[in-house]
């Protein structure tokens, strides 16, 4: 991708078999046609339904170059269903979309997941560009090529790996984000500090949480550092085949997610993903402590770092058996055995397979006590 007019942007390269760039900056809508190029005739703009005003600059940038099909989606996780995906496929078919056409997503992580899956599955794969509108989507869903929808059995159980043609992280879009949504996105950012980049924790612990705003240099650095963590991991292990020298590979990005997904399912997704990740990360840190893997001081640091930015660290609204059953269908499980990404130290992850039921229940009890 060749940038047009000079902008205050950071361009992060994602290597591998299908290289692309993640651009972080402000007012980036005009870059979408530059990424898509001249071979595309039709573009489906899939956007979260409540974000029509934010989608308009992207639609305006696309209109002089392409036939634009704008498709508003349900908000949040309600978009990530087979029924919504089917509606999109039918719309693409009616509009005559071919393999050389493209999809652009604009919204949070759910929009990115659903839109990426539609692009991955239409004619077995068309180009997709992501324009994430939340911190969570910028540092997590938009980068790395994972797409998916939910089923009654669990979250993201149906999906495909489909890398984007480019990602535009427009920090100006965060200015309309409610504060609690911005804070929720920091759950994935702080997680990256524990699994790979402790400087993230240093920034969080040394900053006034109220000063982490869309225009702050601190938030921009946190977003860029979290994106780099994800890039470094996925380039080495795109499809979760496993890492090297004992590293869990891409699975490390699921730190805290086994319990997080169980909490989301138990609450019908009323707990935001980043909030659930914060709770799940503290849960798995406690589990690692009980297993004799992690120092208690690092468990305390989990509690303080997530709490500092305003995230929850405990949960008491579902019983152990319900959450235990939900964790059993986690994608990291193997047969009847639960597997968790845990830490031995900062940025030193490993897999803990088959923890004892006693330790699982004790970690659950600690999670309830922190609620």
Image (cartoon, helix red, strand yellow):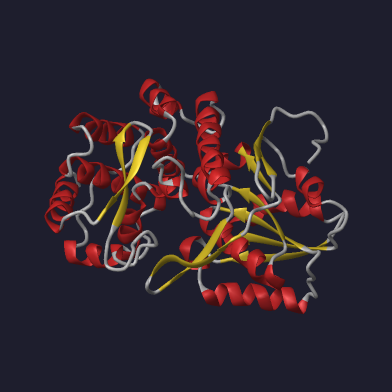
The front one of 194 and 57 is: 194
Residue 64 versus residue 230 in the image, above or below? below
Q: Position of residue 236 (x, y in %)?
A: 55, 44
The front one of 342 and 12 is: 342
The front one of 203 and 121 is: 121
Please name the residue shown 69% across and 50% down the image. Answer: 18
The front one of 78 and 188 is: 188
Please name the residue shown 39% across and 53% down the image. Answer: 272
Q: Is residue 268 left or right of residue 290?
A: right
Please name the residue shown 47% across and 48% down the image. Answer: 250
Residue 203 versus residue 287 in the image, above or below? above
Quarter of the image for the N terminus: give it: top right
Please name the residue shown 31% across and 60% down the image. Answer: 262
Total numbered labels placed on residues in the image: 0
Q: Position of residue 155 (x, y in %)?
A: 42, 64
Q: Position of residue 360 (x, y in %)?
A: 18, 54
* Direction front: furthest residue: 245
Q: Is residue 298 left or right of residue 331?
A: left
Residue 198 versus residue 310 in the image, above or below? above
Image quadrant where residue 289 sits = top left
Q: Is residue 181 left or right of residue 9?
A: left
Q: Position of residue 169 (x, y in %)?
A: 62, 41
Image quadrant where residue 316 sits = bottom left
């Amino acid at each position: 991708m060749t940038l047009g007019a000079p902008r205050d942007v950071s361009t992060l390269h994602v290597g591998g078999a299908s290289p692309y760039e993640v651009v972080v900056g402000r007012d980036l809508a005009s870059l979408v046609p530059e990424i898509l190029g001249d071979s595309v005739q039709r573009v489906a703009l899939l956007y979260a339904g409540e974000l029509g005003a934010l989608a308009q600059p992207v639609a305006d940038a696309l209109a002089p170059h392409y036939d634009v099909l704008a498709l508003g989606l349900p908000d949040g996780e309600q978009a990530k269903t087979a029924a919504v995906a089917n509606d999109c496929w039918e719309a693409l078919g009616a509009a005559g979309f071919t393999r050389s056409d493209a999809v652009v997503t604009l919204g949070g992580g759910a929009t990115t997941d659903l839109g990426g899956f539609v692009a991955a599955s239409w004619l077995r794969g068309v180009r997709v560009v992501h324009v994430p509108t939340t911190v969570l989507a910028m540092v997590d869903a938009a980068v790395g090529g994972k797409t998916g929808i939910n089923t009654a059995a669990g979250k993201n159980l149906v999906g495909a790996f489909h890398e984007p043609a480019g990602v535009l992280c427009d920090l100006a879009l965060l200015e309309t984000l409610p504060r609690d949504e911005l804070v929720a996105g920091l759950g994935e950012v702080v997680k990256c500090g524990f699994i790979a980049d402790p400087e993230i924790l240093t920034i969080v612990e040394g900053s006034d949480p109220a000063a982490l705003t869309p225009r702050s240099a601190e938030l921009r650095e946190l977003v860029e550092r979290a994106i780099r963590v994800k890039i470094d991991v996925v380039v080495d292990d795109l499809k979760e085949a496993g890492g090297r020298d004992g590293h869990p590979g891409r699975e490390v990005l699921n730190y805290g997610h086994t319990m997080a997904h169980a909490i989301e399912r138990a609450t019908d997704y009323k707990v935001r993903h980043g909030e659930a990740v914060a709770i799940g990360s503290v849960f798995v840190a406690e589990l690692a402590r009980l297993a004799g893997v992690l120092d208690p001081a690092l468990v305390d640091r989990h509690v303080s770092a997530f709490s500092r930015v305003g995230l929850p660290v405990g949960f008491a609204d579902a019983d152990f058996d319900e959450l235990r059953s939900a964790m059993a269908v986690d994608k990291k499980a193997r047969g009847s055995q639960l597997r968790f990404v845990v830490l031995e130290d900062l940025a030193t992850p490993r897999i803990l397979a088959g923890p004892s039921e006693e330790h699982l229940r004790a970690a659950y009890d600690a999670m309830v006590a922190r609620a």
